[in-house]
Amino acid sequence: MRKPFIAGNWKMNKTASEAVELVVELKDKVAGISDVEIAVCTPAVDLVSVQGVIKDSNIALGAQNMYWEESGAFTGEISGPMLTELGVSYVIIGHSERREYFGETDEDVNRKAKAAFKYGLKPIICVGETLEEREAGKTEDKVSGQIKADLAGLSNEQVAELVIAYEPIWAIGTGKTATSEEANSVIKYIRDLVREGFGDTADKVRIQYGGSVKPHNVEELMAQKEIDGALVGGASLDAESFTSIVKGAL
Ligand SMILES: O=C(CO)COP(=O)(O)O
């Protein structure tokens, strides 16, 4: 059985003091929940202060990006060992915003995923199609190209630890969600692709849905067979709504 996994992607929101305020409230609200794994993926500058609040709690710490080199002259970048030392467990890799605004390619995503594993971090690899691609019937082509390239060369043991987030780009921050059936069907397709490359390890990979997940739609999404959790943007910025989403996954 795959344990449901609800992760908040705060994106570029919350200063360090606002971040502390949010996790102090969240920690209290989700205390005692053990049947859903919970993580907050904060801006890099918030990691230290957030970890100060959530260490020894049931909330795991995640980052939103990393570079694949261990150290060196890469101004502005953050390495795996820097994250590991802070107690970070997860790192989002290849979010569509990074692919679109910062030019990340599948090759970059693949290198980052390998580096994450090398330094003991679990990647949450994001894939998904644009509205034009969906309307042109190219969802499967897009997702299959991303999955094959992003996971290339990973071992079965690594894939077993991997989290994939299926985030249709047209559903991010727009209030439009894929219907739960649409999301389930693409997620099933992704699991079948993982099975082609990695056999039955595919049954261990947790695949989340992301894109306008809210308290009112999480239960329906989570009721789908293939959906193992959610990567939550806007609704993770408020302790009350994120807690409702976590509880909706129980
Ligand atoms: O991009 C997302 C999570 O990574 C989804 O964001 P929203 O939940 O704000 O649509």
Image (tube, rainbow, N blue to C red):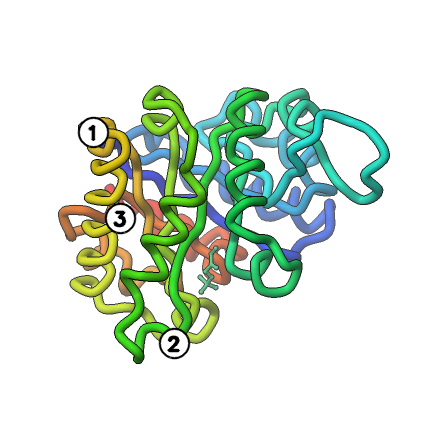
Q: Can you give x and y, in whole percent of width and height, for residue 46 in the image? A: 70, 42
Tag 1's secondary structure? helix
Where the N terminus falls, by quadrant? top left
Front position in the image: 156 or 171: 156
Where the C terminus falls, by quadrant? top left
Neighbour tally class for label 1: few under 14, some 14-19, many 20 plus, Cα within 10 Å: few
Residue that numbered label 2 is attached to: 131
24 lies above or below 100:
above
Residue that numbered label 3 is attached to: 190
Residue that numbered label 1 is attached to: 199
Q: Which amino acid does label 2 sit on?
A: Leu
Q: Can you give x and y, in whole percent of width and height, for residue 231 in the image? A: 41, 51
CB atoms of marks 2 and 3 within 8 Å: no
The answer to whether 86 appears left or right of 100 in the picture is right
The answer to whether 151 appears left or right of 180 in the picture is right
Which residue does the image show at 25% across and 44% down from the upper left?
193
